[in-house]
Amino acid sequence: MKARSLPIQTNNPRPWLWPLVLLMAVTLPTLWLLPVVWGRSITLGLLVAFVALPGLALAGILASWLFRWPQLLAYELSGKGLTIQTHREPVQIARSEVRRARAIAYALRWNPRSWAHLPGYYVGTYTLPEVGPVKVFAGQPRGEGVLLELKDSTRVLLSPQDPAEVLQLFR
């Protein structure tokens, strides 16, 4: 029996993707026309357009790739344990590895050592004042979550939509 649980996600940037693409589509012709309007040569306008086009296209591709990450974060519960899906490879935690599972209120602060700190996608190592270093796989920067304390002293923080379901798996 496998159950897929999604994290609670806030500030997911996905709705902003198409307005960003539209803004880039409007910006490119404007960049090309500015030198022409200012009385410069058309060659300068073409140069600006050919320099800006690859940069803006690359920025759009990068933004669409990053904006997918929040949709990739998921928790799969099974009789054997928990599998956490991220933008990288899945993280598996067996039931036998968990010493203790408890509900916790948390607030994450930005950490340059984290894998990803994007709206709707918080994955990496953070330090919680009352707990210490924690591996975080959450969809929101603050709220109610589940803290798993593993037998090797590692702590894992999750933000499932139904914390009781995760807690029940590890009781």
Image (cartoon, rainbow, N blue to C red):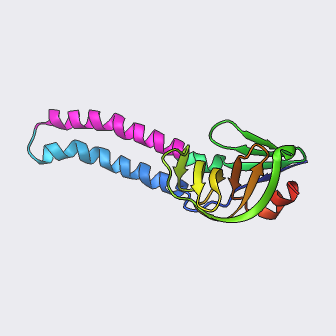
**Farthest left residue in view:** 39
- Above or below: residue 119 compared with residue 41: below
Pick whichever, 143 or 104, lies toward us. Answer: 104
Pick whichever, 1 or 31, lies toward us. Answer: 1
Pick whichever, 133 or 13, lies toward us. Answer: 133
Report if residue 103 is visible in the image.
Answer: yes
Residue 171 lies in the magenta-colored region: no
Q: Which residues are magenta?
A: 41-66
Query: What's the residue at 73%, 62% (across, down)?
Result: 161
Residue 43 coordinates in the image, percent (x, y): 16, 32
Please give left or right for residue 39 compared with residue 72 in the image: left
Residue 157 coordinates in the image, percent (x, y): 68, 54
Residue 59 lies in the magenta-colored region: yes
- Above or below: residue 96 compared with residue 13: above
Pick whichever, 118 or 145, lies toward us. Answer: 145
Please give left or right for residue 101 compared with residue 52 in the image: right
Query: What's the residue at 33%, 37% (across, down)?
Result: 53
Please give left or right for residue 93 compared with residue 43 in the image: right
Report if residue 162 is visible in the image.
Answer: no
Residue 144 coordinates in the image, percent (x, y): 68, 66
Residue 45 coordinates in the image, percent (x, y): 19, 38
Instruction: Count all numbered tags in the image, as a single digit.
Output: 0
Query: What's the residue at 24%, 45% (across, down)?
Result: 31
Q: Where's the C terminus, which quadrant?
A: bottom right
Q: What kind of secondary structure does the magenta stretch mostly adopt?
A: helix
